[in-house]
Amino acid sequence: MKGYINKWTYKRVIQAGLGVFLVYYYTQDHNKFALVFGIVMLVQAFLNIGCFSTKGCDNSVDEKEIQEFAKEIKEVEK
């Protein structure tokens, strides 16, 4: 568990803190939006997914796939 926590970035800590705050806010105000958003933030922080993950919002595409697609387009154009 200690090794898992040591790999966290400051962004994940902030995101988890915000999630905990929003869930706590739900217990005080019964705002369902805060509960849902808080749970989403916590899940993203603990699973390292979403824009705060180590990959960020990167939607990188494999260059090999692009080259193969380009070859297919050239064959169709002929």
Image (spheres, grey):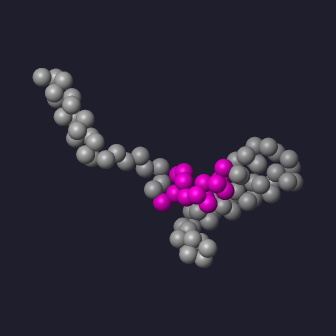
User: Which residue sits at x=75%, y=59%?
Assistant: 21
User: Seen in the image, is 72 located left or right of residue 16?
Assistant: left
Camera-nearest residue between 3 and 54: 3
Task: Locate the N terminus by quadrant.
Answer: bottom right
Q: Nearer the viewer, residue 61 or 1?
A: 1
How many marks the image carries: the answer is 0
Quarter where residue 16 is shown? bottom right
x and y, in percent, of residue 14 in the image? 63, 63
Left/right placement of residue 60 relative to residue 43 reads left
The vertical placement of 63 against 24, above or below, is: above
Q: Residue at x 62, y 65 (%)?
A: 13
Relative horizontal placement of residue 44, taking residue 69 as reference (left or right): right
Residue for point 43% across, 50% down: 58
Q: Is residue 22 magenta?
A: no
Residue placed farthest to the left in the image? Answer: 78
Residue at 18 percent across and 24 percent down: it is 76
Q: Which residues are magenta?
A: 40-54
Q: Residue furthest bottom?
A: 2
Image quadrant for the C terminus? top left
Residue 47 point in image, percent of width and height:
58, 58
Q: Is residue 22 above or below residue 71?
A: below
Residue 53: x %, y % from top left: 52, 57
Residue 5 lies in quadrant: bottom right
Q: Position of residue 67 (x, y in %)?
A: 22, 41
